[in-house]
Amino acid sequence: MADSSKDELIQIIKRFGAYLTVKMSNFFSVFHNLDSRSVGAIAGLAVAIIFTWRLLRSPNAMDRRQPKRLGTRASSSGTNSQANTTSASPGVSSCLEDSQAQIVVDDFFQPVKPTLGQIVRQKLCEGRKVTCRLVGVILEESSPEELLKQATVRSSVLEVLLEITKYCDLYLMERVLNDESEKRVLLALEDAGIFTSGGLIKDKVLFCSTENGRASFVRQLEPDWHIDTNPEIISQLARFIKYLLQISPSRPERTVSNVFSARSLEEFFGCM
């Protein structure tokens, strides 16, 4: 019995290895953003835990640990039935082992939803510097004139914005009509907790008096990405900036390969 159990265990491991080979390519495509050594360590540990747990809980393993004994008064028909079952057991056992190994592999290789941080890095093509307009993107207000009365940070954009600050050197900028508007914007950003994450400081919030001034800021900073709502600014910068994202409710048709569009920053990163 010990030799038979050992052989069955070896066969399960072999079949598991075969399924593992088939699934491995899909697994690495899901985790292409992770370090290869980290992926290998996580995969090895998880496979070992799941496979051992499934093997110990399988009905075959329980039957091998607790073999049943036949009663001495079994009828001749019962004996014949047992003989037939025993003669068919190798094929049935092999099928069950194949099924168990496949279930383990399929469960382990279920698609894993990427984190928001992974999505941000992937969408930004690993860009390390980002410039972004405030009005219409980070703020509820849609024009500098509205900033004369109030400045309100959009709550739905906060999570994305904070993730960007973790991986990128982020600069926020806006055209304002007076000093009070500038102070109002800084206070709104501070109240929203944007400066407490450690990735953004007040010195990286820039203000100017004209739209061309904002374009000039972007040219000087030379970011990998610039995010804006003004199509003229986007058009001017398309020749100089690697990637641009235009935020517009109408989702304009894409005419330049390095210019993308979305109705909001959250939509671009799949948060809506």
Image (cartoon, rainbow, N blue to C red):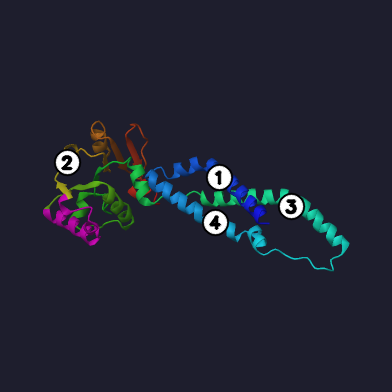
Categorize mark 1 by other alpha carbons within 10 Å: few (<14), some (14-19), many (20+).
Answer: some
Q: Is residue 107 magenta?
A: no
- Residue depicted at 23% across the width and 47% down the height: 170
Distance in Å between CA atoms under marks 3 and 4: 23 Å
Task: Give the mark nearer the N terminus: 1 vs 3.
Answer: 1
Pointer 1: what residue?
17
Report the disc number at residue 89.
Answer: 3
Q: Position of residue 164 (x, y in %)?
A: 29, 49
Report the disc number at residue 217.
Answer: 2
Q: Position of residue 122 (x, y in %)?
A: 36, 43
Which residues fall within the magenta stretch?
Answer: 179-203
Task: Give the mark nearer the N terminus: 3 vs 2.
Answer: 3
Task: Give the mark nearer the N terminus: 1 vs 4.
Answer: 1
Residue type of the residue flagged with mark 3 = Ser
- Residue depicted at 15% across the width and 42% down the height: 210
Categorize mark 3 by other alpha carbons within 10 Å: few (<14), some (14-19), many (20+).
Answer: few
Distance in Å between CA atoms under marks 1 and 4: 14 Å
Distance in Å between CA atoms under marks 2 and 4: 59 Å
Mark 1 or mark 2, whichever is nearer to me: 1
Categorize mark 2 by other alpha carbons within 10 Å: few (<14), some (14-19), many (20+).
Answer: some
Q: Secondary structure at mark 3?
A: helix
Pointer 4: what residue?
52
Task: Give the mark nearer the N terminus: 2 vs 4.
Answer: 4
Q: Position of residue 168 (x, y in %)?
A: 26, 46
Distance in Å between CA atoms under marks 3 and 2: 76 Å
Mark 1–mark 4 contact, CB under 8 Å?
no
Residue type of the residue flagged with mark 2 = Phe
Mark 3 or mark 2, whichever is nearer to me: 3
Q: Secondary structure at mark 1?
A: helix
Mark 3–mark 2 contact, CB under 8 Å?
no
Mark 2 or mark 4, whichever is nearer to me: 4
